[in-house]
Amino acid sequence: MLYLGPAVLVMAAACLYPVVVAFQLAGYDWALGTPWDSARWVGAQNFVSAFTNPRMWSSLLTTLLFAAVCVSAEMVLGIALALALEHPVRGMAFFRTLFILPMMIAPIAVGLAWRYMFDAQFGLINAVLKAVGLSPQTWLADPTLAFIAIVVADIWQWTPFVFIMMIAALAGIDGSVIEAARIDGARWWQQTMRVKLPMVMHVIAITLMMRLIDAFRVLEVVYVLTFGGPGDSTEILSLHIYKTAFIGQQLGVAAAVSVLLLVVVAALSWGALRLSNPMKGEPP
Amino acid sequence: MNRRDFTKASSITVFGAGLPFSGAQAQNRYAKYAGKTVVVSVPAHPHYDAMQKLLPDFTKETGIKVEIDKIAIGRMKDKQLLEMAKPSGDYDLGCYIVMWKSEYVSKNLIHPLEPFFANPALADPAYDMKDIVPIYLENLGLVGGPKGYLAGPGAKLYGLPYGAETSVLAYRRDIFAKHNLKPPENYDEFGKLLRILKDKEGIGALTSRGQAGHQVVHAWLLHLNPLGGSVFDDQWKARFNDKAGVDALKFLQEVVATGPAGIAGYGQGEANTAFLQGQAAMYLDSTSFAGVVNDPSRSKVVGNVSWALHPKGTRRASQSGGLGLAIPKNAKNPEAGFLLMQWLTSKAQDKAVTMAGGAPMRNSTLRDVDAVRKYPEFITFVEALKYSNPDWRPIIPVWDKINIQALGVGLSEALTGKKTAEQALNDLVPQVTAIMRESGYKV
């Protein structure tokens, strides 16, 4: 305890302080650019304002759909890529580097790059569609297509994260276990589904949790790509919070929505950890 | 001239005339601040790119160093609010969009300029306030008058225009000549031209902004004012869903239908690019666009563009807006910040920034022989300024919220076909009214 104490205190201060402040802020009516002294205590009023706003609920639904589609696709693609590249093949170092590049790019730059690629007039995507004989689309001007655009950008950027986590986990599997399965007659598919993936399930759970948390916090790419539009079709919750805080100047209401976001993410993370919790079952 | 116009003109003239003579000649107003550094918050914007080219001369002349904090225009307000809320901020001078002026003043974040101009140790006696385009000075600088943002009793100067603009119509004279067309004089002709150009030329007729948020509202306001509409009536009651509002939105829907593909997702950059790359025959936007049209590195239409007045609807009207400069209350070097602002907005430097690709804010520059030779479109711009309406949008402290969170979403839904023009505007009335009530307006 003596050794752990300082670290626990630092962690508690760093992690809990912002959460406590968010809860405190949710009880005040305060606009950015005004002194804190002018903030007015309004109790639960901000929660009432936030939760009676239909835009907040439509934003939550958009976020849930966005997170479900993105995280599912990223997990499947990331695991598949890791399985495909786990064995030494010619040029693998190149491919591994190539795959993790998107993750290293600043989200604002990712948003801008995809904004140009989805441009209806001059974008690469429409150029490809034309080249294969399909009609070009107004990607960012149509509610459904704009949603697809933000999903594609997120999958492109974050699949490499799943890939890295999984390739590291797969590298840690004891080769003799796989060898034993192979001798017992297990095919590649059976080795993968019955042996490899169950053995790395704790990494899958943690990766899933981290991606879920990130998918709920994504802001910059959507900000640049669509600014929540057309209409509010791509206004995910973090953008709704941003607009409420910085444009609406309702920091208290924004903090109240942030608390809701925290609850949703905590519930989903708890669900992800129930798959396989690496922190459980450790020897005392 | 009616009574209101007289009051407006008088207040600007009296205020402007008094300032330069309020102090004695300053011997060397810069000496005290030589060696200090002025930190300026500016957007990534062609006018401020041009401004940066002048700064070495300022440092050479005054000994005051300048540090620029350049940021995307959409993110500038967040950072400025955070900076200006601190007891001592990092900015000594800041650029703002016209829509923010009332909010900054209501939050007591920027200095009134009168004490600076009245200080003989700082004010340049040769500074000609009356030469600044009056509509720019009113629109960007004055806060506290009628409606809270117009010239008249109670109005005080809080900023100076720098990157100001009005609306004009850019059109491709080669395409118009090919089809024997004339630039539209009024909205009837304008509406008919959209279809004609689309059908005859096969490219977009008119490019426009359209992205959800400020961009789509900007595009709609461009048609609302000339068609006789406004956002509120004189009692601050929403009236934007009346016939003029619906006509303006229907016109914008037609612009989307006949324009380059994807307007409903266009920010200013995409709208500019469509015209510059030859994908649209017309562009109704601001005078600040003129600089890039003539830049061969960015434009494929150099030499093929002419300019016309904003077409007349039920009235002749041009936009007023753009950017200004103000001094934060928590600036570490407010006096040095003022000296830079005064220098940048002087006659000589206004011409210099214009010749470097910026937007003029002085009558002397707009009529300068060298400037007009380089930018013949200034002749049209001067004419457009006669019709520039300082009440183009209600610049009240909550306008940004109404603009982006309410109108910016509802209008966007009308452009994608999710709602009809009438439905979108009617649905917005309760939202806008609720925001106004929250802000203390009795509506």
Image (spheres, helix red, strand yellow):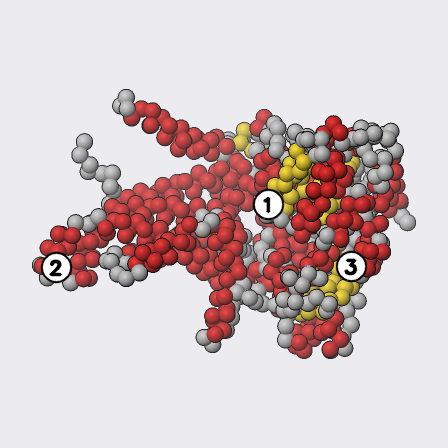
- In the rendering, which numbered label is found on residue B71? 1
As drawn, the label of residue B375 is 3
Q: Secondary structure at mark 3?
A: loop
User: As shown in the figure, which amino acid type bears the numbered disc 1?
Assistant: Ile
Quick one: quadrant of the N terminus of chain A? top left
Q: Quadrant of the C terminus of chain A?
A: top left
- Residue A218, percent across and down? 45, 48
Report the residue marked by disc 2: A182
| Disc 1: host chain | B
**Vertical position of residue B423 compared to residue A280: above or below:** below
Q: Amino acid at mark 3?
A: Tyr
Q: Residue visible at 52% across and 65% down?
A: A123
Label 2: how many residues lie within 10 Å, few (<14), some (14-19) or many (20+)? Answer: some
Residues at marks 2 and 3, CA–CA distance in whole angstroms: 79 Å
Q: Residue at x 64, y 62 (%)?
A: B297
Helix, strand or loop status at disc 2 = helix
Q: Is residue B30 left or right of residue A142?
A: right
Q: Mark 3 belongs to which subunit?
A: B
Is A262 left or right of B265, judged from the image as shown?
Answer: left
